[in-house]
Image (cartoon, rainbow, N blue to C red):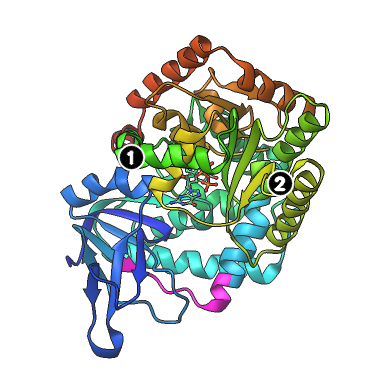
Amino acid sequence: MVDRSPFVVVANRLPVDEIPNDTPGGRVTGTGDQQRRWRRSPGGLVTALHPVLVEHHGTWIGWAGTPGDVAPEPFELDGINIHPVPLSEDDLERYYEGQSNATIWPLYHDNVEPPVFRRRWREAYRVVNRRYAEAAAAVAAPGATVWVQDYQLQLVPAMLRELRPDLKIGFFLHIPFPPIELFMQLPQRAEVLRGLLGADLVGFQQRLAAQNFLRLAKHLLGTPYHGNVIEYEGRQVKADAFPISIDVGEMERLADNPLVRERAKQIRAELGDPKTVILGVDRLDYTKGIEHRLKAFRELLAAGKLTVPESVMVQVATPSRERVEHYQALRIKVEREVGRINGDFGRVGVPAVHYLHQSYSRSELAALYCAADVMMVTPLRDGMNLVAKEYVAARLDHGGALVLSEFAGAAGEMRQAFLCNPHDLDAVKDALMRAVTVDQHEARRRIGVMQRHLRRHDVARWASDFLTELGATS
Ligand code: GDG
């Protein structure tokens, strides 16, 4: 473990999972009662940043995943310095579930659920953001580059700049940045904006989000901007779009694995070899439009345009933020809708919707992607949506069709998808039917164009574009 790093990533969560002590393998830290075992968690962000972190002896700062007042000691894993920050049960309830996921998350996603505002959550957000900023200030070498990630840590750039004016600070927001009218509802609005303006470069998924940010700064603080550069307190802050992507190579390797291909066939057989398998894969989140797609499917079944068992839907809804009220309410609504569809259109042993409230391995996900004729990605608002990109990358056979919401960042790049407005049920039904009935030649052409785009724009390119632009800021 080095004391100070020239490259530091700060994210809510560390890219590691603690595994039970009796599991073979993993990296062991501590001894006796304090012994712990760690494994790198899969994910696009860590894959993209891993080479940069290894090359620059980089450090990743974040929460290790277990609540407590004291964090595990820093350690090294696969060439990355891991620097845990503690989060207590209270912090998790207020900073993470409260301010991050019940206030900011819905507000930044067009208020698709009403945000909840609580003073004690805001205070916890401030306290925890300071903790992360202090950790970064302590590990960053003189003149280091620090890259702060996402909506949980928007105050960190300014806090860090105050502690360490010598650093080059980048910030990337993985979720949408709302228009002025919505952002203005945030009780902490000026503080959050000033927090972000502590960075040299603020990155967004889409150009529209960067523009919202530039306009907001002018509106709220009167800071002028020229092009995409804001003049703020004698410094220049650049705002730009960097659409994130996936590790295309990893998904292609998975999809090319004979075991995965075999599993895809087996999944279709287990589903009764239907003509059309329609798939959804999402965290169980109200922004993802799961109910909307279920309703579209139900109406098409009711109208006889689709029939069971020729068509079946598989919906993977990975458990997420289960202690937040909005999420509990969503689960009830989704499960009620699934029950209604199966009650009306299923038969014994032949459900219309296979609903799976579980997490799967990457290879099982790849097999599901390969098994699906139509992938439905219908968020009401989404920063990017990596599932859409994963599905396309997995289709080495050039088969399949993607139905994609116009409100996903991915729609900006994947114009060959069957695009739809998820708020308009008829439009969703129409896009689904076009995807179900598209002729093979046209389907292959569409997937092919999107794959070529993805191969040139993978997550490594995203990281290098951001870091190059950050390096070029004055
Ligand atoms: C946020 C923004 C933005 C899902 N179920 C399982 C599983 N997943 C994986 C998917 C995909 C990832 O989780 C989900 O990424 P998304 O982009 O679809 O959505 P968010 O979680 O909301 O991500 C989003 C993203 O950040 C990146 O900037 O695109 O807009 O909201 O990779 O495959 N992975 C495994 N098991 C599952 O059951 N292993």
Determine whether 461 is above or below 291 in the image: above
Residue with the most extreme bottom position? 33
* Residue 8 image-quadrant placement: bottom left
Left-right relation of 402 to 163? right
Image coordinates of residue 47 in percent, x first then y, are 30, 46
Residue type highlighted by circle 1 = Leu
Give the extent of the magenta segment. Answer: 83-92
Label disc, if present, on residue 254 of the rendered structure: 1
In front: 235, or 198? 198
In front: 181, or 149? 149
Quarter of the image where the N terminus is located = bottom left
Q: Is mark 1 on a helix, strand or loop?
A: helix
Image coordinates of residue 122 in percent, x first then y, are 63, 65
Asked if ligand 1 lies within 8 A of label 2, the reply is no
Judge depth for marks 2 and 1 and give the one in front: 1
Image coordinates of residue 234 in percent, x first then y, are 43, 42
Identify the residue at horizontal 73%, vertical 48% (top origin): 338
In front: 341, or 458? 341
* Residue 298 image-quadrant placement: top right
